Amino acid sequence: MVMFSKRFYSLLEADNIPATDKEAMQAELDKGSTPEDFGAKELPANPDRDNVRQAKQANMSVQLNQLKTWVEEIDKFTTYLNGVNSESIQTQLHQAGCDSLFEKIARSETKKIARVAVDLSSLSESFKGYLIAGSAEARLG
């Protein structure tokens, strides 16, 4: 392993690393031989590569939009479960009168509702991280 490491680092530090496969082959051949003697040639430009890149970018755009929609819906539902507005489930349960069905639900299910809201919020934040990473990747192409 030490031998490999030394060789690897010496290659990294070398100034005369060939830029193309043809140059690398030329460096390894006997004197008087050329890469063309062995049928080596430069590869033509590949127009399909641009089509593939465009298809990937289009697919990424569609997926980013879908992910953005998921984040919005999860955030809406989290607010609906445990928001500070008067329409949230938690608020309505805690505003219920004594000895009512909602008061019984509030007493037994408040922690569960809060836990579900926290888990959904965590999922939303994870998705937002993927959304940021995906947007950066899409910009880089």
Image (cartoon, rainbow, N blue to C red):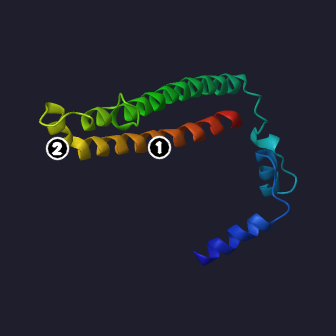
- Residue picked out by circle 1: 126
Q: Height in image: 86 above or below 36?
A: above
Q: Residues within 10 Å of mark 1 (few under 14, many from 20)?
A: few
The C terminus, quarter of image:
top right
Q: Residue furthest bottom?
A: 2
Residue 118 in percent (x, y) is at: 36, 45
Q: Look at the image and tell me whether residue 141 can be seen.
A: no
Q: Residue furthest left?
A: 99
Q: Height in image: 47 above or below 125?
A: above
Between 118 and 83, the residue placed more toward the observer is 83
Residue 101 in percent (x, y) is at: 14, 32
Q: SS of the residue at dot 2?
A: helix
Residue appearing at x 81%, y 40% in the figure: 36
Label 2 to label 1: alpha-carbon separation: 29 Å
Q: Residues within 10 Å of mark 2 (few under 14, many from 20)?
A: few
Which labelled disc corresponds to residue 79? none
Inspect the image, locate mark 2, and give the three-letter code of the amino acid beneath it.
Ser
Kindly indicate the quadrant of the structure image that contains residue 54.
top right
Inspect the image, locate mark 1, and give the three-letter code of the amino acid beneath it.
Ser
- Residue picked out by circle 2: 108
Q: Nearer the viewer, mark 2 or mark 1?
A: 2
Q: SS of the residue at dot 1?
A: helix
- Horizontal relation, residue 38 to residue 67: left or right: right
- Ranked by sequence position, the earlier of labels 2 and 1 is 2
Residue appearing at x 18%, y 44% in the figure: 107
Residue appearing at x 40%, y 34% in the figure: 79
- Horizontal relation, residue 72 to residue 135: left or right: left
- Horizontal relation, residue 109 to residue 136: left or right: left
Q: Look at the image and tell me whether residue 50 can be seen.
A: yes
